[in-house]
Amino acid sequence: MLPTIGHWIDGKRVEGGVCLQDVFDPATGKAEKRVFLADESTIGAAIASAQAAYPGWRAVSPARRARVMGRLKQLLEEHAEEICALVTAEHGKVASDAMGELQRGIENVEYASYAPELLKGQHSKDAGPAIDCWSEFQPLGVTAGITPFNFPVMVPLWMWPMALACGNTFVLKPSERDPSSALLVAQLAVEAGVPAGVLNVVNGDKEAVDALLADRRVQAVSFVGSTPVAEYVYAAGCASGKRVQALGGAKNHAVVMPDANVKTVVSSMIGAAFGSCGERCMAVPLIVAVGDDVAKAVIAGLKSGIARIKVGPGIDSGNDMGPLVSRQHLEKVKGYIDQGVAEGATLLVDGREIRVPGHDEGYFLGPSLFDDVKPEMKIYREEIFGPVLGVVRVKTLREAMDLIDRHEYGNGTCIFTRDGEAARYFSDNVLAGMVGINVPLPVPVAYHSFGGWKRSLFGDLHVYGPDAVRFYTRRKTITQRWPSAGADEKAVFSFPSGR
Ligand code: NAD
């Protein structure tokens, strides 16, 4: 009998739902646990618990809520190894990468602990005769988050710590493929002082998501995942009257200018394309080389860099790349490599034949490298989400930027150059939400916000950072007048103005 994973509702672990689904260790291909997939009534119980906890939590002062986040940061640091071990066991990523994701998540908890400062609002004294006017940011009520498999710790921490710090309660629906770490973090949140019901975690699939989206008690939904689901969640959530931010997929391009430092490009691109097996929305699966000379030099460097990449189980600290998340995803990524060959791209390094001794059933795929990728090819247009890097050759920066601008996705992009003017023109004009200049993964720090353009984000506000404060609160503006005793009070028929 495999151990089961339930939900976290009203401050305790509970089980229940439509069915149980296997959770695999991607390094061995063996089912190790089974997760309950929530049905409508389980989701309803989580929402009811969040709804009941809301008035009490809203009344807690921002300073006290912030102190809870401070304690949570400490607990996450103390339990880092335990949390990361769960990530590696269910997602497959190497331990150092899991630690990196946890650290970025902790930075969001730290930012949430500045909530009293962030919620201060704006005040105007003497906006009129004896009149003051101020704006304040009030919580929304029950809020929810739906998160992807690829950052099982960090992405939930983009959402709920700030939602809670702003006075909301929360229902999280993590990915059913790697559900355990979110539950452990929820337990630590209780230890940090989050009262029962303020944070609930329900595992599940589409049925659980649909129940969350349809429930009118949920005021706002943050979603991170693939673009088709993001678009669906945005439409369904808005249709049921919610505020929605839905972050989708990506296909990030790195432009390499003729004057770029090739060594920097190669080392940056090895990490950006193959780190976490390419399963990152900020991964860079495309190089756009401006000129054949730089293309040749970068390809030569990549080939020798790729030859040194160690692929194997994530728990072995000597490995650079773990397995992909599932057998189905492994087959999908291999299918893209087949397709690239069929469409005429030149396959320079083929990762399909990799063998990891003792792990024949694991979902391993070696790094692959294509040259001569063309914009009409499927491997150029679609998000592969695997360790497959393609090189597109162009003649000018403008041509490179036209490619990026015309692409369906606009999450991140970067340029490698020593020319400040080119870099400035690029960052000013390119159609993407996050731009790196000699930085391959321009993931904003926790006190900025994260989000793409075009079909990489549906909604207005980005996630975490200052935008999160706006997303999880609504502005109320109060105008007050305290006329002095005996003031001459006359009816006024003109519209009040500052004249
Ligand atoms: P996914 O879209 O399959 O799943 C995301 C979440 O939606 C999960 O919780 C899942 O249970 C749920 N879901 C799946 N199918 C659904 C459906 N039909 N209806 C309702 N809910 C559904 O994504 P994934 O495979 O878990 O994650 C990988 C994707 O996430 C990639 O496309 C990646 O680019 C994207 N991603 C984007 C960002 C970003 O910030 N833009 C960050 C991380 C991942």
Image: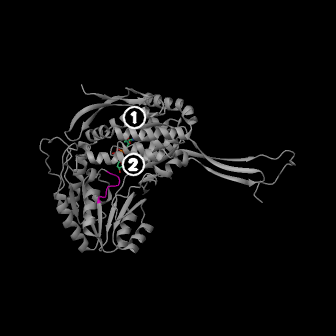
Location of residue 155 with respect to 387 vertically, above or below = above
User: Residue flagged by tag 2: what amino acid is it?
Assistant: Pro
Please name the residue shown 25% across and 37% down the image: 24
Quarter holding ligand 1? top left
Please name the residue shown 38% across and 36% down the image: 185
Which of labels 2 and 1 is toward the front? 1
- Determine which quarter of the picture holds residue 149: top left
- Circle 1 sits on which residue? 188
Q: Is the magenta stretch mostly helix, strand or loop?
A: loop
Q: Which of 73 and 265 is in front in this view?
A: 73
Q: Nearer the viewer, residue 434 or 314?
A: 314
Quadrant of image for the N terminus: top left
Residue 373 visible in this rendered orientation of the protein: no
Q: Residue 485: where, in percent of width, then height?
A: 85, 44
Q: What label sits on residue 228 in the rendered view?
A: 2
Q: Is mark 1 on a helix, strand or loop?
A: helix
The span picked out in magenta is 280-285
